[in-house]
């Protein structure tokens, strides 16, 4: 999936938000882990993919409304390392 996905109303949405918005509503609370990474054009190096504060808020709100709980959020940083939130 691309870094940004286009919505019908021509707004841009980050891929991590697009991902959780596509989840179907669950009948029971389900914990999920989300992994976000970005690479250079050659696919040989990890780049910074830390979700912005607005994305984190939107992800949490969307997951709660669909009966999910964010267990772990992993992302690549500017040093090519995988970092964990939550």
Image: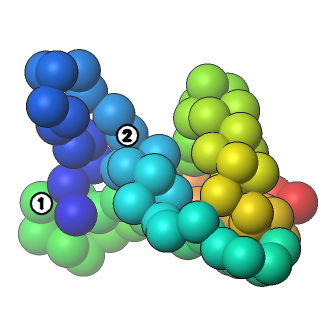
Q: Residue at x 20, y 73 (%)?
A: 43
Q: Is residue 26 at all visible to an observer of this figure?
A: yes
Mark 2 or 1, nearer chain start = 2
Nearer the observer: mark 2 or 1; the answer is 2
Q: Which residue is mark 1?
A: 41
Q: Residue 46's image quarter?
A: bottom left
Give the x, y percent position of residue 41. 12, 60
Q: Is residue 62 above or below residue 63?
A: above
Q: How is the image coloured?
A: rainbow
Judging depth in this view, the residue of 47 and 62 nearest the camera is: 62
Dot 1 crowding, Cα within 10 Å, few <14, some 14–19, many 20+: few
For numbered disc 1, what is the local secondary structure? loop
Judging depth in this view, the residue of 80 and 72 nearest the camera is: 72
Judging depth in this view, the residue of 49 and 16 nearest the camera is: 16
Which quadrant holds the N terminus?
A: bottom left
Q: Is residue 59 at all visible to an observer of this figure?
A: no
Dot 2 crowding, Cα within 10 Å, few <14, some 14–19, many 20+: some
Q: Check residue 80 in the rendering and tell me which mark sits there, or answer none.
A: none
Q: Residue at x 45, y 51 (%)?
A: 21
Is disc 2 in contact with disc 1, using a CB cutoff of under 8 Å?
no
Q: Residue 32's image quarter?
A: bottom right
């Amino acid at each position: 999936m691309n870094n940004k996905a286009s919505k019908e109303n021509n707004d841009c949405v980050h891929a991590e938000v697009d991902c959780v918005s596509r989840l179907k509503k669950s009948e029971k609370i389900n914990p999920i882990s989300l992994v976000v990474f970005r690479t250079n054009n050659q696919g040989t190096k990890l780049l910074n993919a830390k979700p912005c504060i607005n994305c984190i808020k939107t992800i949490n709100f969307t997951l709660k409304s669909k009966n999910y709980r964010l267990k772990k959020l992993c992302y690549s940083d500017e040093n090519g390392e995988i970092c964990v939130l939550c």
